Amino acid sequence: MEDSFEFLSLVLDSITEHIVVIDEAGDIKYVNRSWSAFGNNNECTVGHDWRGVNYLEVCDKAAGAGDDFGANAGDGIRSVIEQRSSLFYLEYPCHSPDEPRWFMMRVSPFRISDASYFVITHQNITERKLAEEKVLKLSRIDELTGIANRRHFNEFIESEWERCHRHNMPICLAMIDLDYFKLLNDSYGHQVGDKCLKSIGKILQNYALRPSDICARYGGEEFAIVYGDTNLQQAKGLLNELLKQIRSLNILNENSPTSPTLTASVGIYSTFPSKENNVSELIRRTDDLLYMAKKNGRNQIYS
């Protein structure tokens, strides 16, 4: 068996992926040079000194500390050891202080002299993950304004609704419509209109700064802001400032019946998510309030 492991080490040491071999109990029997070098220079889980270490115990300890990767890795490795799965794959982050990094763990069985062992490889997939994140980000951004698009808004509000429901927190939605924007386009041309929308998008970004907030282009000249864990009074204070900032841009809209410069109307609604209501109702109620703001003179907030 020692000869077999010696031959195996010659093969695995030539591989750039980080590799560890464990037995059925989870005890580490071998790590390749790439694993050792990575462990000496980093603080990820695979960086532990391998001698006398039980890989499964390391996973369980991490899981006990709240590490989802540790729990998923331990379950996956055991599924291969217990022959419930023939292979196991898991992608996970292992970021350094200087750069983001992702790896893919792969677990596969093999036998030497009638004994079962398991190869665990950790392949660096950072380049692919960064490319995927870039594509995902682009798919969620409105090209003209640089803020979230309708698709991202729909995904976000559903997720934030569920989070607020779990923690019994309020969620607030604001719908913002630029007053008589069609007249602005007709009067000065679409290039001026596009420039105006870009200016509004830039302002909106300053009113959705927390992870629980999002500003999005809802459609045309209509925008939306979601505030998680925020009541109506808090949100109205922010939106009043937003309207002042839009007016302070002094964007000409001389044919508007409301004002010779650009203004906006806002509908805003706050609620506690429950089993009796849903996201569609939140959007409907907010849209109704926006309609009232426009019907009754525009350039104001209805709540």
Image (tube, rainbow, N blue to C red):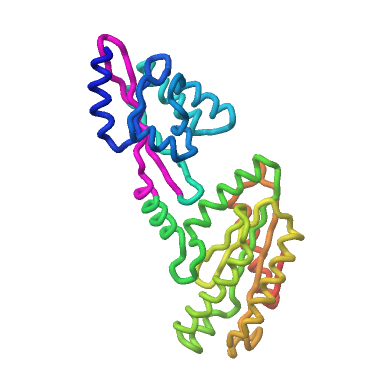
Visible residue check, residue 276: no
Would residue 64 be counted in the magenta stretch?
no
Q: Quadrant of the N terminus?
A: top left
Q: Which residues are magenta?
A: 100-129
- From this view, report whether residue 144 is shown above or below residue 34: below
Question: 139 or 122: nearer the eye?
Answer: 122
Residue 20: x and y, percent? 36, 27
Q: Quadrant of the C terminus?
A: bottom right
Q: Residue at x 48, y 51 (%)?
A: 98
Q: Residue at x 54, y 52 (%)?
A: 156
- From this view, report whether residue 155 is shown above or below residue 235: above
Q: Residue furthest right?
A: 233
Residue 119: x and y, percent? 33, 25
Question: 240 or 301: nearer the eye?
Answer: 240
Visible residue check, residue 178: yes
Asked where in the image residue 85 lies, by quadrant, the reply is top left
Question: 184 or 140: nearer the eye?
Answer: 140
